[in-house]
Every structure is written in structure tokens, then in C-alpha cells.
Image (cartoon, rainbow, N blue to C red):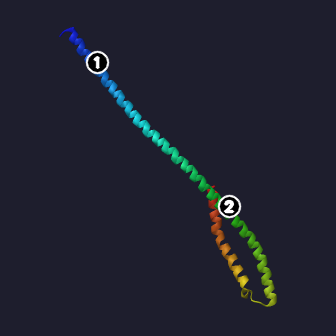
Amino acid sequence: MSDYKRVLKHLNKEELSTQKVELAAIDDLKELITDAKRIIGLQEDGVKRGNKAEREYKEVKKVISDAEGITRGAIRQAGNLKKESDKIFNKVEVGAKELGLNINSIPEYKTAFKLISDMFENQNELNGMNNFLKKLL
């Protein structure tokens, strides 16, 4: 075989090898582009969901704070009303006894006594709820 043919044959093999390397590199680049696009999509979705979580967390935290304030206020007011009701019940009981009346014959006394009793039946649950809410804040 002539030197010319050998050089051409050798050049063809080198060109083909170079083209194969270039094609493999382009395939790698295409895969890189696909992976980068997929990851950018995940990042955008993560930021979007993170922003939504932050907004909803702030809303939930406000609801918890409001509920804690309401339960705390109800507990304080119930304590104050209990002290006041003890004085009023005592005064009414003494007055009824002096007049010879059965305390349970006074409708307002029965209603007030029942409501104050109901109010204090709610206190344990309310105290528990208030403690729970404080822990969340």
C-alpha cells in the first residue's frame, strides 16, 4: 500500500475517533442540560412551596396566638367572677335565711349558681388548652 493510502486510512480513523469523542461530549452536554432543567424546576417548586408554608405558618401562628389570648382572658375573668359570685351568693344566702326563704326558691339564684358551676366545669379543659397553646407559641 502506498504511503499516500496509508496516511489517508490513518487520517480517516483519527477523524472518526475525534467525531465519536465530539458526539459523546455533545450527548454529555445534552444530559447535563436535561438534569439542570429538572433541578431548576425542583428548586422553583421548593421555593414556591416554602413561601406557601411560610404564609400558612404565619396564619396558623396568629390563630394560635389569638386562641391563647382568648383562653388566658377567659381564665382570668372566670377567676374574678368566681370571687365576685362568692360574695353575692353569700349575701343572698344570708338575706334569704333572715327572711326565712328557701334559697333554691329564688330563680335568679338557681340560674346564677348553675352558670357559675358550669363555668368552673369548663376551667380544667380551658386551663389544659391554654397550656397547650402556650407551648405552641
Neighbours of disc 1 within 10 Å: few (<14), some (14-19), many (20+): few
Q: Which label belongs to residue 14?
A: 1
User: Is 105 located above or below residue 10 in the figure?
Assistant: below
Of residue 9 and residue 81, the one placed in the foreground of this image is 9
Which residue shows up at 71% across the image and 70% down it?
A: 78
Which residue shows up at 37% across the image and 30% down it?
A: 28
Neighbours of disc 2 within 10 Å: few (<14), some (14-19), many (20+): some
Q: Secondary structure at mark 2?
A: helix
Which residue shows up at 48% across the image and 45% down it?
A: 45
Q: Which label belongs to residue 69?
A: 2
Q: Which label belongs to residue 58?
A: none
Cα separation between marks 1 and 2: 81 Å
Image quadrant where one finds the N terminus: top left
Image quadrant where one finds the C terminus: bottom right
User: Is 96 located above or below residue 70 in the figure?
Assistant: below
- Residue 94 is left or right of residue 115, and the answer is right
- Residue 135 is left or right of residue 48, and the answer is right
Q: x%, y% of residue 58?
A: 60, 52
Q: Secondary structure at mark 1?
A: helix
Q: Residue furthest bottom?
A: 100
